[in-house]
Image: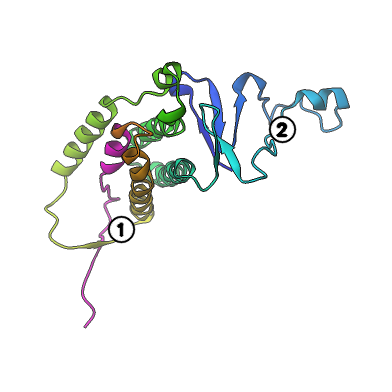
């Protein structure tokens, strides 16, 4: 079950693949005052996180259009969600290791929320108001390129293929890099069809290899 919290685009909604739930309707799940023996009237006020609207194999985009779940839109949304999750896991390892670029990883996750919002708004069914709310800025691409250039200056010249290794955070970042490439492949047909902003594909195309500082394993051709 995948969620895209679109607070950074001003939608003020939680997008789940298949439904939209107003944030105002959502209730905290861990407050002390929540009681498991609440009355039936109280239960009716707690929104369910499932809607059954996707049981027949269709889900809704932000524009309200119903599409099959195997549609390119939902494939791109799902892989973008997986990418953000992979970055989140890598960031936790990076925090444990005391790396300085964890803020950048968090910012990338925030931008990926905007990417998801843009993908979830296919141009063929979007009104001007939809496009205005989910427009993806090229400034995010420029900022990411600036980070990549800065990190590249700190790295030695790459003369060999590197195997995913170098410690937990480095290996986790390699997983995120691979997930990013898959997300890029899934987004490509959506961009080519004109359903989403080309800047989304550019953002996914930019990625940096960050290492933990441990020695990484150099690829050697088996004898």
Tell me: 51 left or right of 167: right
Res. 166 mark: 1
Res. 152 mark: none
In the image, 184 versus 96, the foreground residue is 184
Q: Quadrant of the C terminus?
A: bottom left
Q: Position of residue 114 (x, y in %)?
A: 41, 29
Q: Position of residue 98 (x, y in %)?
A: 35, 42
User: Is residue 84 one of those drawn in magenta?
Assistant: no
For label 2, the residue is 48
Majority secondary structure of magenta residues: loop
In the image, 60 versus 223, the foreground residue is 60
Q: Eyeballing the image, is 106 above or below 126?
A: below
Where disc 2 sits, the SS reads loop
Determine the residue positioned at 53% across, 20% down.
Answer: 12
Q: Eyeballing the image, is 12 above or below 17?
A: above
Q: Quadrant of the N terminus?
A: top right
Where disc 1 sits, the SS reads loop
Report if residue 100 is visible in the image: no
In the image, 124 versus 95, the foreground residue is 124
Q: Earlier in the sequence, mark 2 or mark 1?
A: 2
Determine the residue positioned at 20% across, 62% down.
Answer: 161
Q: Eyeballing the image, is 142 above or below 216?
A: above
**Residue with the most extreme front position:** 124
Nearer the observer: mark 2 or 1; the answer is 2
């Amino acid at each position: 079950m995948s969620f895209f919290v679109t607070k950074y685009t001003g939608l003020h909604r939680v997008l789940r693949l298949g439904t939209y739930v107003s944030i105002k309707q959502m209730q905290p799940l861990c407050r002390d005052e929540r009681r498991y023996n609440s009355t039936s009237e109280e239960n009716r006020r707690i929104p369910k996180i499932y809607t059954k609207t996707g049981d027949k194999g269709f889900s809704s985009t932000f524009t309200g259009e119903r599409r099959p779940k195997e549609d390119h839109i939902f494939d791109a949304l799902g892989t973008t969600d997986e990418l953000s999750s992979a970055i989140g896991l890598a960031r936790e390892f990076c925090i444990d290791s005391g790396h300085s670029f964890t803020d950048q990883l968090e910012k990338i996750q925030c931008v990926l929320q905007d990417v998801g919002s843009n993908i979830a708004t296919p141009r063929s069914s979007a009104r001007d108001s939809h496009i205005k709310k989910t427009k993806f800025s090229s400034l995010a691409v420029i900022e990411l390129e600036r980070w990549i250039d800065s990190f590249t200056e700190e790295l030695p010249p790459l003369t060999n293929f590197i195997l995913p290794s170098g410690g937990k955070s480095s290996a986790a970042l390699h997983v995120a890099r691979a997930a990013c490439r898959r997300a890029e492949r899934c987004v490509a047909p959506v961009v080519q069809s004109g359903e989403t902003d080309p800047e989304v594909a550019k953002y996914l195309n930019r990625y940096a290899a960050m290492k933990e500082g441990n020695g990484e394993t150099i690829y050697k051709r088996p004898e």
